[in-house]
Amino acid sequence: MVNFFRKTSKTPGLSPGTLVHIGEKKTEEVNISVIDYDESQIQEKDAATVGECLPFKEKPTVTWINVIGIHDITVIEEFGKAFNIHPLLLEDIVHSDQRPKLEDYDDYLFLVLRMLRYDEPKEELRSEQVSMILGPNFVVSFQEHEGDVFDPVRARIRNGKGKVRKMGCDYLAYALIDSIVDNYFLVLEKYGEKIEILQEEVLSHPTPDTLQVIHGTKRDMIFLRKSVWPLREAINALQRGESSLITDAVSVYLRDVYDHTIQVIDTIETFRDMISGTLDVYLSSVSNKMNEVMKVLTIIATIFIPLTFIAGIYGMNFKYMPELEWHWAYPFVWIIFVVLGILMLIGFRRKRWL
């Protein structure tokens, strides 16, 4: 279950553009990888410093710089100076709880997305922020953690398959966005299976643990909606914007991503309704079981009320009671008890209370 209540606030009173990392505290070194390519050649490099990326900035080829780790403020500041990035944009990069959005800075576009993955062993939703800067001939992406969903894009670049090597950096940005959105479907597929199991469990043998799983899944659906809903607006603005960085040829592909985003949102809304219905069924099932228990106890108590009345009468310590000296009094009382119980059970059966 994703954590909604992690600390996301920074020290109040700081000037705009002050870089303060907000997110998971890490001590690992920042990894910078560079893929530079055109239709005829490709070059890959692991850069030790930001300065090693500068020669690719002025090349006419398409350059993808991927930065893993946003906790080192010094590295982020160096990127800001090297690529002339606005301080407010850098602040959004290191603040890892941004909502998906698109900002146009004339010379480059800034896009924030949520990369979601489902951890099957732990049955948890993993989320991290991916910040992307689209320039005239480069794309710079910033990630929080090692590992991503971009391996298919890297494979297409290396193998020269598809149009990625023939198109510009705007198509590369589209391919990265498309990989993130396509992975949403894999996450939703896992949740679809999880909801089906929950529905069967609720109908057969609901337990308190089932209720916890239902609430956790419901929270995840809310987080998914929060992560995907603003992305629809961002992609729509990206395809309909007037930026010269997005060509008409790529706008067609962005419309396809927009349609996929709408489909993801519709699926999330469906799952939210299903999990809410599952919660209602769970509460109804638990209530019905409690009613069945109370019904059985009520019938037992009702049967014993007249028996207790008779036993109470003959349990009184009066000396002169007519049946006390009767030889067959004790078995006769038992016969009365049994007959009354049977008659009451027959009456309950006829009224369909049993």
Image: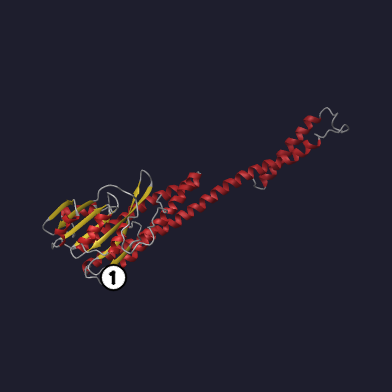
State the residue at coordinates (76%, 33%): 335
The residue to which callout 1 is attached is 240
Is 288 situated left or right of 308 in this image? left
Q: Residue 34, percent across and down?
A: 18, 54
Display colour scheme: secondary structure
Q: Residue 160, percent across and down?
A: 15, 55
Please name the amino acid that badge 1 sits on: Arg
Quadrant of residue 333 in the image? top right
Nearer to me, 233 or 334 = 233
In the depicted structure, whether residue 167 falls above or below residue 332? below
- Point out the residue furthest to the bottom here: 242
Count of marks, rendered view: 1
Nearer to me, 43 or 239 = 43
Is 82 situated left or right of 283 in this image? left
Quadrant of residue 247 in the image? bottom left
Q: Residues within 10 Å of mark 1 (few under 14, many from 20)?
A: some
Q: Residue 22, percent across and down?
A: 35, 55
Residue 354 seen in this snapshot: no
Nearer to me, 47 or 330 = 47
In the depicted structure, whether residue 177 falls above or below residue 351? below
Is 208 situated left or right of 255 in this image? right
Look at the image and tell me in which quarter the C terminus lies: top right
State the residue at coordinates (83%, 27%): 327
Q: Residue 194, percent across and down?
A: 41, 48
